[in-house]
Amino acid sequence: MSTIRDVSKLAGVSVATISRYLNQSGYVSKEAEETILAAIQKLNYKPNNIARSLAGKRTATIALLVPDILNPFFPEIARAAEDVASRLGYTLILCNTDYNPDKERNYIDVLINKRIDGIIISSYTIRPEQIYALEAENIPVVVIDNAWEDTPIVSITSANRTGGQMAAQHLLDSGCQKIAHICGPYHITAAKNRMLGYEDVCKQQEWFTPSLMVYGDFSVSGGYSAMRELYAKHPDIEGVFAGNDLMAAGAMKALHEFSVRIPDQVKVIGYDGIHMDMFYPELSTIAQPIYSIGERAMMYLDQMIKEHPLEKKNYLIDVQLIVNASSRSL
Amino acid sequence: MSTIRDVSKLAGVSVATISRYLNQSGYVSKEAEETILAAIQKLNYKPNNIARSLAGKRTATIALLVPDILNPFFPEIARAAEDVASRLGYTLILCNTDYNPDKERNYIDVLINKRIDGIIISSYTIRPEQIYALEAENIPVVVIDNAWEDTPIVSITSANRTGGQMAAQHLLDSGCQKIAHICGPYHITAAKNRMLGYEDVCKQQEWFTPSLMVYGDFSVSGGYSAMRELYAKHPDIEGVFAGNDLMAAGAMKALHEFSVRIPDQVKVIGYDGIHMDMFYPELSTIAQPIYSIGERAMMYLDQMIKEHPLEKKNYLIDVQLIVNASSRSL
DNA sequence: GTGAAAGCGCTAACAT
DNA sequence: ATGTTAGCGCTTTCAC
């Protein structure tokens, strides 16, 4: 591997000039430019980014911390973030934290030692203090899918409560009488807000009873069990709003096994809008613009890295009702 | 941020000793160890990995190049590779190449400049020469899901042809008479081999005709269109073997729309074994041990990085027939 | 416009 | 067992 010094020798100019040329910093004459370019090509010279990072400051690397890339929500986030990252010249490190604060802390330490330029993090366990600590090391952070009120942290969340209301209202409008809710893990803010949205709409209905709300763990099997439990207690339900699409899938599976026809007897709606074109019937959902959340996270992060002004607050993203066969009125 | 020199000063020993202590290389006395540890904690010293990489050789970073993390096959690979990577002290960079040789080349250049320690790559377009070039830069490579015969390259593929045979044979054994195949993109070795496996078993059947083999692009919608085309030509087929699970899902969707009952009228089997617990009926498949492919890729890579002996060849992984409701005999 | 030289923070001979 | 020192390849004053 040739170094900047080799180029310097061959081109007959100092390394400083080469560096200026490479970084478009400072003046370089036309002639110098040409000899340098020739030398670079002749030697097939590639600047060493490690050295560059040590001397300068940036590593052109950012990290994405997610609970688990196997959860279909996160590949889309990862894809979006990586697309933008690569367009902006960053490289993206992927970390799975498994909802485990220790793993999380561990990764954060490693990433600090690697002097990465910024972190996008999706976590329900991280504390604001940890984020301040990162920013103290000059590593900006963007949080997705979680937020704290009145806290100077850049975060992106979707309008979960409104979305929950939309889902419940849609089932109501479709003529459903007894609408159940399969709620995600209580400690997840997003899950709680979706549930609150459901309550906003359903609590005042005469058919409402708290046992229409059951717990699921955001997984297919969680939705499946929840639906079985629900159906045992309330064989007369007409609508189900699941806290995410995976649980909705599980619920549909359980309903199929009970030979309940969807949407004739029971209408189902999920939440998230992950790509589920494989379903039959296709699932209605409250779609979050997942890709654009990932995109924006990376763009905000870039702004912070470049020290461009950016208001430190929660950025709320609109959601959208997608009506498919699983909840269609006949 | 404190440096090794700060620690050296505070502990009253030389930087070399600190370095030896940090890397467990060379002798360090018990007393020295203690003062050093104390100083490190007092200063909250964290070694700078950038400097470490520049001086030493390793960056403790590896990259995973995949066509698209949105394809459900790859998150599982990524998860497995990252699990092993983090256990071994590496950090994993994720790159999406979109089956695009230019993007691929581009990423490879960037990664070389970052002096990463190794690459795991899933690509149908990469050429052996590119891999040799990487190894010439001292960057070992493990290829997954693709291989070249008699070439000194470490690759991991599953037994696609055998798997194709197993799928077709299973449908045959289940009493299917006219079995169709939805084949993946022809230039993908894995797709071609699965098709060959199908042919091995079906070509000699009296009902066989080439028009039972149609093309799909490995996506749900590809499988859907292929199934519609197939059904128009052969409304009497009794079995479908799709080249991957996504196309199988699309095929099932099309069959549902034709009100064809699965598995009573038509049995369906896919290929891959991605996590599709959301399906109803659950899909039969030829399961590749996807996670363990990712794991092994990372383990082989680590061996190469550490310059441990490893035979440069294709490692073939067994597949497994998983019978679920979509192809169950009644 | 260009060059000399001092780092960036660490590792690894080599000397002691 | 420990210290000295020369790099690793680049950026960046500062002087010319």
Image: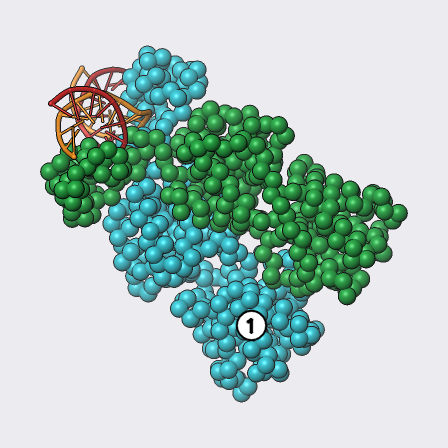
Chain colours: A green, B cyan, C orange, D red
List x then y, in percent, for residue A230.
80, 51
Q: Is residue B280 visible?
A: no
Side (left or right) of B116 relative to A191:
left
Q: Nearer the viewer, residue A272 or B279?
A: A272
From the viewer's perspective, tell me whether residue A140 is left or right of residue B309. Answer: right
Q: Residue at x 40, y 52 (%)?
A: B65
Q: Secondary structure at mark 1?
A: helix
Q: Chain of mark 1?
A: B
Residue under the image location 35 percent in, 50 percent down: B107
A312 or A116: nearer the eye? A312
Q: How many marks?
A: 1
Where's residue A88, x and y in %? 40, 43
Residue A264 showing in the rendered view: yes
Q: Position of residue A325 (x, y in %)?
A: 70, 63
**Crowd band around label 1 with a 10 angstrom C-alpha radius: few (<14), some (14–19), many (20+):** some
Q: Is residue B112 above or below residue B317?
A: above
The correct choice, above or below, for B191 with respect to A289 in the image is below
Q: Quadrant of the C terminus of chain B?
A: bottom right
Residue depicted at x 77% and y 66%: A330
Q: Which residue is label 1 attached to?
A: B225
Q: Quadrant of the N terminus of chain B?
A: top left
Q: Amino acid at mark 1?
A: Ser
Q: Residue B222 appears at what percent x and percent y?
A: 53, 68
Q: Quadrant of residue A239?
A: bottom right
